[in-house]
Image (tube, rainbow, N blue to C red):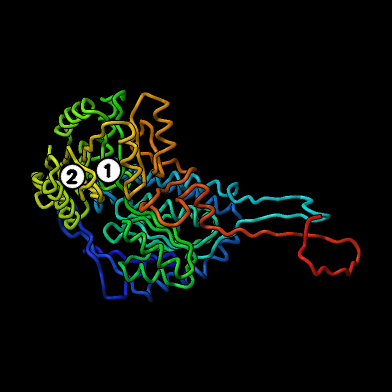
Amino acid sequence: MREISHFIAGRAVAGTSGRQGEVFDPNLGEVQAHVALASAAELDRAVQAALAAQPAWAAVNPQRRARVMFAFKRLVEARMDELAALLSSEHGKVIADSKGDIQRGLEVIEFACGIPHALKGEYTEGAGPGIDVYSMRQPLGVAAGITPFNFPAMIPMWMFGVAVAVGNAFILKPSEKDPSVPVRLAELFMEAGAEAGVEVSGVLNVVHGDKVCVDAILTHPDIAAVSFVGSSDIAQYVYATGAAHGKRVQAMGGAKNHGILLPDADLEAAVGDILGAAFGSAGERCMALPVVVPVGTKTAEAFRELMSARIETLKIGVSSDPAAQYGPVVSAAHHRRVSDYIQMGVDEGAELVADGRGFSLQGHEKGFFIGPTLFDHVKPAMRSYQEEIFGPVLQIVRADSFEDALALPSQHAYGNGVSIFTRNGRAAREFASRVNVGMVGINVPIPVPVAYHSFGGWKRSAFGDANQHGMEGVRFYTKVKTVTARWPEGEGSDQAFVIPTMR
């Protein structure tokens, strides 16, 4: 059985806690590897390695750090097929989707390649008589990231790409469900340092674990900042615990993203977009689109008819099948969870138009497959609407007017993303301005911002006041130092006993 170790100070380190987790092949429903689960002492070992490496890494000038990021990008691109196959084998998403996972992470690495420009400070000459004022951004020291199973390449790169580029050392605690790709990324970062002629041992460390490791990260006195992506309840816990221990924390939570469908929308195009956004990656995306809100009965009936027909054409298969549009969910436990939510919707009185619970793939009967599921006449009071399902389940919530449709995502507990499908520019502009959600798409079903902007939701979708990547990421992983300088002439001995002013 394959054993997955930690990666500390530039090399694989076997676990010593005596605990381990199981890594499944979701296509077969079988255990394919064991992963070490760290104790607090093992986490501390990684912190000490990071502390030892960080001062020298921060002293490397930004151009040379950028060269490491350029080299890392080239190495990941050269191994795209290898990494995608490894990712799919543990997560279950199809190869094309895994490549997209990696590519979206690389886009943040591309942003990090320009870190010399992003770190430029501000300067004011002559702010007072002979006085200049300037500011600089400096790294925090050691930062940590706790990442979910659904994007085992993208989200780690979102975090460590910016964090290390600005001069921090980083400790990554990936999901124990699919931990192999994060380790390979750390190995490739080591290769990138060698290629660029820069010592990077200890700059990027990977420690596997469960709540024991998470709590050790949140309470460790030498970790200055923590970035988290996961469910909202845990995000709130991470934010509260980390902040209570004096850390900067950005904690991204769950979602219930809506797609508003106005009567004037290009219905064929919208159905195609929503089909992929709802069922791609088996719905295991925080930016998936699990709720569609058609405005008016005519729009709702037309959408339901078209979507029902398109669902029947979906190809579900093993992750290595190039014809498959989505694969299994990640685990047996998650399969049960999604199935339970489908039954909940039935019990609550929603109309089950298509039921994916009976789906089975020949030759892979033990795999964690769920077919596409469609509900109609879902009501806002239903628990299955209020909570995140995180599976291949699409719910239709009908609205009578634009105002009713606007109110649904605005009043929902989650506020990650929302999309509107329309040809009416004024309606789209008003919707984007008024909706109480952090990321908005206009005829774009998955409105994830490009890497040089930032990613972040509102309400229970995010805790803390800093978003992921872009300049928000630079600000999160650095602290500002402001210098006020005067070079007096002669040997003046006047002493001021009042607060300095710039008269």
Q: Tell me: residue 3, above or below residue 279.
A: below
For mark 1, does the 10 Å Cα neighbourhood hold few (<14), some (14 to 19), or many (20 or more) residues?
many
Q: Tell me: residue 41, above or below residue 433.
A: below
Q: Tell me: residue 302, above or below residue 460.
A: above
- Separation of marks 1 and 2 at Cα, in angstroms: 10 Å
Q: Is residue 82 visible in the rendered structure shown here?
A: no
Q: Position of residue 442 (x, y in %)?
A: 38, 32
Residue sitting at 17 percent across and 53 percent down? 335
Q: Nearer the viewer, residue 314 or 467?
A: 467
- Report the residue marked by disc 1: 95
Q: Earlier in the sequence, mark 1 or mark 2?
A: 1
Q: Quadrant of the N terminus?
A: bottom left
Q: Position of residue 151 (x, y in %)?
A: 33, 50
For mark 2, does the 10 Å Cα neighbourhood hold few (<14), some (14 to 19), or many (20 or more) residues?
many
| Marks 1 and 2 in Cβ contact (< 8 Å) | no
Residue sitting at 58 percent across and 48 percent down? 118
Q: Position of residue 237 (x, y in %)?
A: 36, 64
Q: Nearer the viewer, residue 23 or 257?
A: 257
Q: Secondary structure at mark 1?
A: helix
- Report the residue marked by disc 2: 318
Q: Which circle marks residue 395 in the picture?
A: none
Quarter of the rendering containing residue 308: top left
Q: Image check: 502 left or right of 315?
A: right
Q: Tell me: residue 224, above or below residue 258.
A: below
